[in-house]
Image (cartoon, helix red, strand yellow):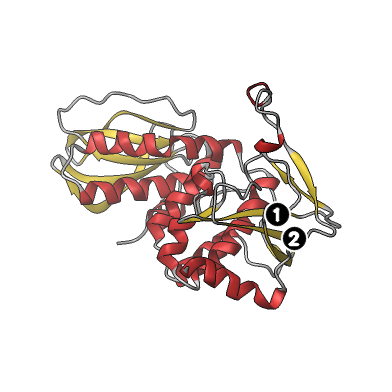
Amino acid sequence: MSSVAEHFAMLRLAGLPSGESTLRTRTLPISVAAGPILLGMDGLGQRHLLVPVGDAEVVPDRASRGVVTAERGLVLGDAEHRFLDLSCLSSRLDRPFEQLAEDVLRRITESSDDPRSTVSRTLEDWREMLRAAQKGMSRESIVGLTAELELLASLAAVDPLAAIDAWVGPDNAVHDFKRGSRSIEVKATSAVDPSFVHISNVDQLDPAPVAELLLAVFHLRESPSAPNLEERVEALHGLGVPESLLADRLRAVGYTPRMELAFPDRLEVRSFTVFAVGHSFPSVRSTDIRPDARLSVRGLEYDLVLAGLPDEIPEAEVAAALADWMTA
């Protein structure tokens, strides 16, 4: 079966229909009880996924500004048919919408549930990602995601399934990677002359709760020859990282392949340094704050100066250290 993106490309090539409410459609080889599912494009170039519902009620969902559901009637042949219309109202969300539609179709084929419920649940699962995509990824977010994907690739070369399981940063965990009682915190900078990295809370560089804590620092810079985010994702697939698990993590950080980005994402690694964070490593920790004052202090952030940091793992030993982190 052709991908959703390919179907929409064919609809675009066929020309937009006249009138905003008119749809040009393509029938998919996926059906529900009421008939085959359609993809459509209207006179504004907006994308639609049309799930036939027969006489069933359709409850509109306009909670997301850019992607909504509504009831739509279409005349096909000599008869009018009713559909649940999942539509994309923002061109910025065209690429994420294609991924959303793919997910809806996958869930419909894998489940015997009412397709209306499947569409509703899938949209709810994607709502936060769509909100982030509508807003757009910041340059800082692109730099940070690039660094985390770079480290994920290093870990996936050892064990792809364990690597994606260890990537917990998208779930707002304290550290970006966690395996058992071991953690890795990733920091990235694209400054021309980086002298520090930003630490966002007092727990990130506190080694007390874990058996081992590593700090991985990436210095990135723009380069037309560097892989972009989409190419990094494809490389991870090639290493054996499951596509569905990786897609879930990426959605959690507000990224889907082919989405529109406002900042360059072809970034090369100028340097990659790993530190073993022990109890003597310079950092601010919650234990540094008087017990009677901790409840009154919140949102503490600071910058960590990179020059002269102790316990740097020699470059020649980094690969072995990461492999040991994965297998121990």
Q: Residue 133: horizontal and vertical position, in percent?
A: 55, 40
**Cα–Cα span, label 1 and label 2:** 6 Å
Task: Answer with left or right where residue 112 lies relative to residue 51.
Answer: left
Circle 2 SS class: strand
Quarter placement of the N terminus? bottom left
Q: Residue 146: horizontal and vertical position, in percent?
A: 62, 57
Residue drawn at (62%, 50%) of the image: 207
Can residue 280 be seen at all in this image of the molecule? Answer: yes
Residue drawn at (48%, 34%) of the image: 89
Question: Which amino acid type is shown beneath numbered disc 2?
Answer: His
Q: Quadrant of residue 288?
A: top right
Determine crowd level at label 1: few under 14, some 14-19, many 20+ residues with C-alpha closer than 10 A: many
Residue situated in front as seen by the camera: 176 or 101: 176
Can residue 75 be seen at all in this image of the molecule? Answer: no
Circle 1 SS class: strand
Residue 188 circle label = 1
Instruction: Check whether the beta carbons of the residues at disc 1 and disc 2 lie within 8 A of each other.
Output: yes
Residue drawn at (16%, 33%) of the image: 54
Question: Which amino acid type is shown beneath numbered disc 1?
Answer: Ala
Residue drawn at (52%, 34%) of the image: 131
* Residue bearing the label numbered 2: 219
Task: Answer with left or right where residue 204 lies relative to residue 21.
Answer: right
